[in-house]
Amino acid sequence: MEIKISEKTRRFVLQMIPKEELLAELSPKERLAGLTIGGRRQLLRLLQEEMGNASGDASNNDKEAAKPTD
């Protein structure tokens, strides 16, 4: 499964990861290990927004599913 990310998220990740790590040809997992907790939270928020947008705003779907039925 291929996940497409927005330009905004791509730029954020490139800004957060030091240039030396990008040039060192580390795996994505190794690069993310160097992020601060705050950076990881920001990245998670951006990815959650994108996943919500890709699935037709899943947050609204959750609210609808939580409503009681008769």
Image (cartoon, rainbow, N blue to C red):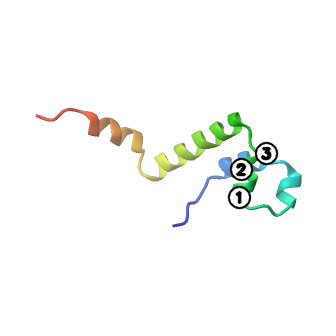
**Disc 1, SS:** helix
Residue drawn at x 37%, y 39% as measured from the top left: 60
- Up-down relation of residue 63 to residue 20 (above or below): above
Residue underneath mark 1: 28
Numbered disc in front, either 2 or 3: 2
Numbered disc in front, either 3 or 1: 1
Q: Residue flagged by tag 1: what amino acid is it? A: Pro
Residue drawn at x 51%, y 67% as measured from the top left: 1
Q: Which mark is residue 15?
A: 3
Q: Which mark is residue 32?
A: 2
**Disc 2, SS:** helix
Residue 42 at what x, y percent from top left?
A: 65, 37
Q: Earlier in the sequence, mark 3 or mark 1?
A: 3
Mark 2 and mark 1 in contact? Answer it, CB < 8 Å.
Answer: yes
Residue 18 at what x, y percent from top left?
A: 84, 48
Q: Residue flagged by tag 2: what amino acid is it? A: Leu
Q: Residue flagged by tag 3: what amino acid is it? A: Gln
Disc 1: CA contacts within 10 A as few (<14), some (14-19) or many (>=20): few
Mark 2 and mark 3 in contact? Answer it, CB < 8 Å.
Answer: no
Residue sitting nearer the eye, 2 or 38: 38
- Up-down relation of residue 28 to residue 42 (above or below): below
